Structures are given as C-alpha cells and as structure tokens.
Image: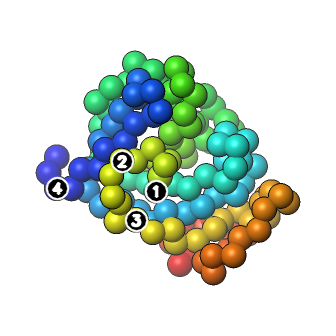
Amino acid sequence: MTGKVTKGSCLCGAVAFDLHGPLRPVYACHCKQCRKTSGHFWAATSVPDEALTFTRDEGLRWFRSSENTKRGFCGTCGSSLFWVPEGERRTVVAAGALEGELELQTKAHVFMCDKGSYYEIGDGLPQFEEFKGDENA
C-alpha cells in the first residue's frame, strides 16, 4: 500500500499496527460497551479492513461483545484497541492507540443515551442519541 501511514500500538507493544491512507474523523462513543471496555467514553476513528496491517500481533486477542460485534485488545497489557462491526468491511480503531501528531479532530459525541452520569460535556461538538454513520454530520 502507498500513501500516508499512521502507526499505532498497545501500551506494552505486543500489538502494533499500521493504518494506510486517510482516517475517518474521531467519534466519542458513550455507549455502555465502550464505557465498560475503556473505563470512560471511547474515542475512535476507522479504516477499511484492507487499510489495517499488523506489524506485531502476538498479544492480540478478540472477544465477542455482542452478537454482531467483536473487540480486539492486547492480552498482555489489556489495552482496548479495536471494534469490528460484523457485516461491514471496516475496523474501528482507538484514537488513543495512534502515535505522533495526528491530523484528526473529534466530529461528534454518539450514544448520548448511555452517557455516564458522572461527567459533563462542554466542548460544543454535536451530540447524538445514537450513531448513524455519516448521518451524524
């Protein structure tokens, strides 16, 4: 693959990856699953499956978090890294796992219906009860 490459990894380095090409804007997801897996809301971008290559994956583990979703994490350090919606050819990637200066901005907050009661959001970004892909523009 050619073009821009964004590198990412888990905390301990047992999982490392490259993302090839442009990244989708970041969405801050406040759904119950993202809050449980990350400890707070989860900020993520996504790429087509073919744009993700692993440079190190011995620590990579997957679990099914719902009937149509699986999540990838490092089995060594526990970093939550990926979310894969079944039936779609894309992988959602934790923005916090990406390295270097990123040309990414958060576009919106989604799944506000599940937002934790212990924090407020005051950044002025759009807030949606659900996530409807590019409809959340």
Q: Secondary structure at mark 3?
A: loop
Q: Residue at x 31, y 44 (%)?
A: 7
- Mark 3 neighbour class, 10 Å CA radius: few under 14, some 14 to 19, many 20 or more: few
Q: Earlier in the sequence, mark 1 or mark 3?
A: 1
Q: How is the image coloured?
A: rainbow
42 is higher (above) or lower (below) than 8: below
Q: What amino acid is found at the position of numbered circle 2 in the picture?
A: Glu
Q: What amino acid is found at the position of numbered circle 3 in the picture?
A: Leu
Q: Residue at x 69, y 76 (%)?
A: 122
Q: Which residue is mark 2?
A: 99
Q: Which residue is mark 4?
A: 3
For the residues bearing labels 1 and 3, Cβ distance under 8 angstroms: yes
Gap in angstroms between the C-alphas marked 1 and 3: 9 Å
- Mark 1 neighbour class, 10 Å CA radius: few under 14, some 14 to 19, many 20 or more: many
Gap in angstroms between the C-alphas marked 1 and 2: 13 Å
Q: Mark on residue 126? A: none
Q: In the rendering, at what x and y percent does residue 78 appear?
A: 57, 28
Seen as rendered, the residue at the extreme right is 117
Q: What amino acid is found at the position of numbered circle 1 in the picture?
A: Thr
Q: Which residue is mark 3?
A: 104
Q: In the rendering, at what x and y percent does residue 44 appear?
A: 51, 54
Left or right of residue 5, residue 109 in this image:
right
Q: Which residue is mark 1?
A: 45
Q: Earlier in the sequence, mark 2 or mark 4?
A: 4
Seen as rendered, the residue at the extreme left is 2
